[in-house]
Each structure stands twice: as structure tokens, then as C-alpha cells.
Amino acid sequence: MAAIIKKYFSIITRMQMLKLSDFDYHLPRELIAQYPSVERDASRLMVVDRRKNKIEHRVFSDIKDYFSHQDLLVLNNTKVLPSRLFGKRITGGKVEIFLVRHIGGLVFEAMLKPGRLKFNEKIVFDNTDIYAVITGRNEARFQAESLEDVYKLGVMPLPPYIKRKSEESDTIRYQTVYAKNEGAIAAPTAGLHFTHKLFEQLRDIGADIGYLTLHVGLGTFKPVKSDVIAEHKMDAEYFQVPQETSELIEKAHAHNKRVFAVGTTSLRALESYALGQREGDTRLFVYPGYKFKEVDALVTNFHLPKTTL
């Protein structure tokens, strides 16, 4: 018993001492695609089978081969808003307003560039009468007819590793085909590879498909500043698991079937759900040593060094 306890605390200590540098690696810029594959499901797929200690290299459309009858696929149906706006000061200087969160009315929490904008300063936009007033260090109020008019000024907020300007095609390709509930400032990118045809093929196998919502927030773009991983604090993100998906989860468990989470956002929502929370903000931080309670398999993209994704 003493040996078991000693081993347990040794594992806990290693978890607590994980360093940010443990999650660093060399990533050549030229290997980061600046445009998606022509076909969503034509991306390369690496399958890691931990039980068999085996790695396979396939095409994403082959993912259906890893599902069986009554397995459950869970996807995040959040919808990305065109939340990156470019305007000008009255003096002509360029301004970027990145809409982070809708506070109410036409007021937003926002990331502002440059950071030296003055309180009550007016920001104008080309070819429109709409303007914004800086009402706080990270806050802007718009003068417009509706929220829709504000978002018409914006472009899709591409990830920082995409070193090009947003294009019209991004309004379609940087959005999952099942996006529904508006509120994200970044796409749940693992889901970008799925197509309606692939969903049909999964249903033909007998797999179930469920949806939840987690609005990807500002934390996605924030660097990890703590050298010790366990000391990092996650930003709160709103999530909701609907009753229909809850029933599909219980069905999968009842038949001893697997739950596949699409993306780390779905995984965090599902694991928060397992802790008894169906809706609300989650700050759950999953790192090596975490014991999964709900998720059996994860579909995810590769991620940048030193990030929480």
C-alpha cells in the first residue's frame, strides 16, 4: 500500500511540475498551410491508436472507418462572427476593433489597436455613416441601426498563424458546415474537415451525431504566461449541452459505445458536463494526467507550440 501511495504522489508531482517548455517544438513556418484543402475532407489524417501503440496515415474522409454502430460523434455548432473591424480616427490614423463579447445593446468588449485610443474618441468606417465611440479601455459603443449592421463592417478573424488578409472565401471556409449558434470569435477548427456527405456515411454505419455549443473566446489567442502549466488560468467560455445530446451520451454509455469529441472545445464542454454542469461558463483546463470521464476519442488539429489547445 505504501508503494502505491508513493507512486500516486509521484505522478501528481510530475503533473504539477510540467513546464511550458515541455510543450515547445520547432514548427517551420513554410509547413503551415495558408489556405485550406480544396475539399474539406481531403486533408491528411493521422490516427493514433494508443491501445495498439500504432499510428496510421490516412485521408480525413477515411475517418468513418474508425466508427462502429451506436458510437457517438459530438460537434461544437458555435458560429464565428465577422468580428474584426478596421476603421479610422478622425485624424486619419488606422484603428482595429476586435469584437470579443457583446455586452448589450450596441456595446462590445473589444481589443483595440492602437491601445492609446482616448475615452469618447470617435472611430469612423469607410463608405458608411456607422461609427464607434471608445467607452472604456477595452470597450466600444456603436452608432448603428442594428447588430447586423455592425457585423457587416467586419471580416472573419483568422488565426494568428495565417499570415494573410481575410478574404471573402473565408466567410464560408472558416466556418463549419453545421455552424448554427452565433457567438465565437474563432472557429472550432477540427470541425472544418467534416462534410454533409461524411455525416451521411456515418449515419449509414449507425453512428449517432450530437451537437453542443461552446463559444470560442479570447483565451484562444492568449499566450500561456506561466512557466508551470498547472498554474495557468483558463479564460471562461460559455457552453451548453442540449437535452437531445445528453440523451445520446447516456445511450452511448448504456451500450458501452465510444464518445468522439470533435475538437478541444467539444472535449472541454463534455468533460464539464461530466462534472454536473449542463450550461454556463467553464474554465476547465485539461493537461497530461487528467482522467477523462466522458470522452473516449478526440478528433483534433495539430496546434501551435506553447498553447492550451
Image (tube, grey):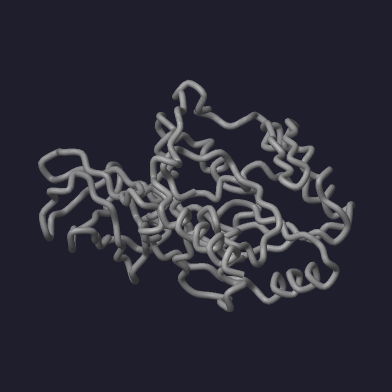
Q: Position of residue 203 (x, y in %)?
A: 84, 55
- Tell me the residue at 66%/51% (across/down): 298
Which residue: 50% across, 52% down?
80
Give the x, y percent position of residue 193: 66, 41
Quarter-of-image position of residue 219:
bottom left
Position of 199 relative to 31 (above/below): below
Q: Is 168 on the left or on the right of 145, as rendered?
A: right
Looking at the picture, tell me which residue is in the foreground, 54 or 167: 54
Give the side of residue 185 with respect to residue 61, left or right.
Answer: left
Residue extending farthest top:
30
Please tell me how many numbered marks the rendered image carries.
0
Judging depth in this view, the residue of 53 and 238 nearest the camera is: 53
Residue at screen point 46% across, 34% down: 167
Eyeballing the image, is 25 above or below 136?
above
Res. 173 in view: yes
Q: Position of residue 303 (x, y in %)?
A: 51, 40
| x 37%, y 57%: residue | 232
Q: Is residue 138 left or right of residue 45?
A: left
Task: Place residue 307 in its image quadrant.
Answer: top left
Residue 153 visible: no
Above or below, 165 against 73 in this view is above
Between 183 and 106, the residue placed more toward the observer is 183
Residue 263 % position (x, y):
60, 51
- Quarter of the image where the N terminus is located: bottom right
